[in-house]
Image (tube, rainbow, N blue to C red):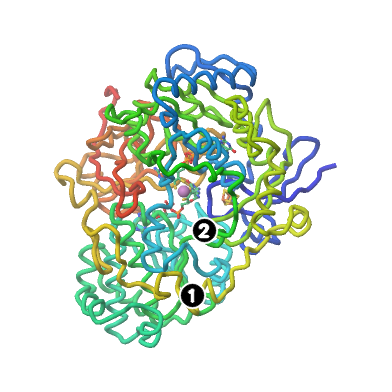
Amino acid sequence: MPTLHRTTCAHDCPGSCALLVEIEGDQLLSVRGDPAHALTRGVICGKVRRYAEIVDGPRVARPLLREGPKGSGRFREATWDDALQHIVDGLERAVRAHGASSVLPYYYGGTLGLVQQKAIERLAHRAGWSRLERSLCFAIADAGWSAGVGRMLGPRPEEIAHSDLVLLWGINAVSTHISLMSHVKHARSRGAPLVVVDPYRTRTARLADHHLMPRPGTDAALACGLMHVLLDQGMEDRAYLASRTDFNAEVERHLTKCTPPWASAITGIAVDEIVDLARRYGRAQRPFIRIGVGMTRHRNGAVNLHAVSCLPSLVGAWPKHGAGALIGTDAGFSGIVDERVRGTRWRDPGVRSLDMSQLGRWLCDPALAPPVAALLVFNANPAVSCPDLGTVHQGLQREDLFTVVHEQVMTDTARLADVVLPATTFLEHDDLYRSYGHYSLQLGRAVLTPRGEARCNHDVVNALAQRLGHDDDLFAGDSLQRIDQVLAASGLPDRGWFETHGPHDVGMDEDVLHFRTRFPTRDGRFHFMPGWSDSAMPRLPDHWAVNARDVEDPSRTPLDFMAPPGHEVLNSTFTQTATARRRHAPPTLLLHPVDAAARNIVDGDTVRVYNARASLVLRVHLTDDVTPGLCLCETNHLGQDFPGGMSVNALVDAARVAPGGGPAFHDNRVQVSRLAPGAKV
Ligand SMILES: Nc1nc2c(c(=O)[nH]1)N[C@H]1C(S)=C(S)[C@@H](COP(=O)(O)OP(=O)(O)OC[C@H]3O[C@@H](n4cnc5c(=O)[nH]c(N)nc54)[C@H](O)[C@@H]3O)O[C@H]1N2
Ligand SMILES: Nc1nc2c(c(=O)[nH]1)N[C@H]1C(S)=C(S)[C@@H](COP(=O)(O)OP(=O)(O)OC[C@H]3O[C@@H](n4cnc5c(=O)[nH]c(N)nc54)[C@H](O)[C@@H]3O)O[C@H]1N2
Ligand code: SF4
Ligand SMILES: [Mo]
């Protein structure tokens, strides 16, 4: 008889969907969304509905030790005992030669689970290894949002159903946050128009009543142009501005200069469209802007996000139910005490911290002292998901680098490892889940037995720590006990409560989420003046011309290039599944017919896409889903889908985005040329 189990999706996705999983024996029959969850409402993505493709697809089943040169893909199976001893030997060699900080843990978005995701941190702190600056996703957004609002908070996403004007700004929710869309649909059924702001016609934009297509990296110009019109038409809320914000005559004078023709020249959006959107926004009673991190992945991304966050302040939309803006909900979970997972008691501020987005640099810089001699990768695939892949690959190929990868599947990173350890999927281990897209804390119980000899991160870290001679109690006990400890330390209901009731709302008051009494800033006000820590950044909301388009020679790299997430994959996860192979591979370049004609390119041609960092070969699809001057590839892919073995992020620069770091995945310039049939690739 099949049984139904409640659990939570562990993937790096704002949904953190509540799931109902049907099991018979030890077989996964189906995965669906839990209709009872306030945001999920029974709606989940196709990728996780087909999760059997991961669980019972090709997996790393047993520990593997490298044979032959790095990257040859030749491994031999080993016992856990042998593999762990091999790792201990490798780590001890690195530490003897270069000291403890020559070991770097690298762990990211494979799982968002509280117990599994950061388990390696406690061992890293205990052993004095280098720390990892976790900048790959939200660093720019954090900086941009904090500048105005103060903290990563905002109205509950479900409230979007009560909005009378929905703006999805730089978020492709149909692909990246499907549960949101049923709430958007609800708002539309009650008459709210949907406006999408995205440089290309995404699946989400196809559904919109109005789609504005700004040039990538120009949202601040659009937001300032809208604010100009709102002020010009007297649609601002003076009482709100005076009592809740730092709006003053200087800001107002500055916005007077940001006319629609000025905004139009920068964004490429027609003056009429800007004026029309401003009027709609000003007239709406409950406008809700759901912003995506996609729009922040530019050198000026923090400036752009801050400018967009000014809109609800100008019209006084924040306090109203169903109105305001949201990019993330992280700060809702700040009361959770996860010290027993992360071992912050051992954190030594004197130990260096390396920015994960610049992994290539740390692996290859001969001046780095001490060098990175050992790399421990958990729930991440940097050989695909990091920027500047050419350097990352060069580093991972170093014969003197000792690399351990804990993985479910044979990824590009695992292929370059010395030791590969089999990892459980979230249906095979226990964990507790926060969310960055809603405010409920959820339990995720193991509902299947681990496939092969897979072990969870928590157990691997403990086993490794014990072998390295650390007998502290943080390295004992199983994941369930660790969940209990975290819940108790945080003053939350116990596990039994979650098992009976399901998701636990972290209890953020609506007044707090709408900033009705104060914003979470120093002075309680929203800041139109961002006060950036980096003095090169603009003092006021403005277009900041520092992107690739502004600095690269247009005769060499004339086209904008973006690398946004694909529908059938999640970063590089799912890329090897049968469905993704069928629907997502091979990598395709979307190019406008005008740009194609100028290059003698026809639909279906094979083209070379190149810039100073890399040259990749892709198949071309001609479409007006992109504007002239913009081309893109929906990512990510297996390296093997490219003749050079390296996927799209080889074209992406790893320079730190101001003010606090983070990669500019969508801010690139390239040239495209047709590859003659039979040409050497
Ligand atoms: N199917 C699928 N779902 C995913 C992921 C995935 O890879 N695939 N990744 C997951 C993760 S880790 C994250 S962080 C989220 C990210 O999900 P989102 O928040 O949606 O962010 P992105 O998908 O990076 O970008 C969203 C949109 O921003 C647009 N964009 C790029 N530059 C600009 C700009 O300058 N201005 C404007 N207005 N728009 C711009 C892109 O074209 C893209 O359509 O999604 C998660 N969900
Ligand atoms: N071109 C381009 N690149 C991007 C982005 C983009 O928009 N465009 N987005 C960026 C963003 S937003 C993010 S968050 C990063 C994500 O980058 P990563 O965090 O590297 O995410 P993935 O590439 O999906 O790799 C995660 C790996 O973890 C494994 N895994 C899953 N669960 C577990 C587990 O419990 N234990 C262990 N040990 N392994 C597990 C999966 O099999 C998978 O191979 O990518 C970034 N890269
Ligand atoms: S939409 Fe995101 S959170 Fe929901 S099931 Fe899919 S991957 Fe998981
Ligand atoms: Mo992300």
Picture coordinates of residue 84, whole percent (x, y): 59, 22
The residue at the point 37 percent across, 35 percent down is 359
Q: Quadrant of the N terminus?
A: top right
The residue pinned by badge 2 equals: 330
Picture coordinates of residue 431, whole percent (x, y): 66, 45
Mark 1, residues whose alpha carbon is within 10 Å: few (<14), some, or many (≥20)? Answer: many
Tell me which amino acid carries mark 2. Asp
Looking at the picture, does residue 514 appear above or below residue 113? below
> Helix, strand or loop at disc 1?
loop
The residue pinned by badge 1 equals: 515
The residue at the point 37 percent across, 73 percent down is 311
Residue 505 located left or right of residue 318: right
The residue at the point 49 percent across, 79 percent down is 517
The residue at the point 25 percent across, 79 percent down is 252
- Find residue 460 and report its image quarter: top right
Foreground residue among 98 and 260: 98
Which residue is situated farthest in the top direction here? Answer: 68
Tell me which amino acid carries mark 1. Phe
Whether residue 416 is visible to the viewer of this picture, yes or no, is: no
> Helix, strand or loop at disc 2?
helix
Foreground residue among 573 and 358: 358
- Find residue 70 and report its image quarter: top left
Q: Quadrant of the C terminus?
A: top left
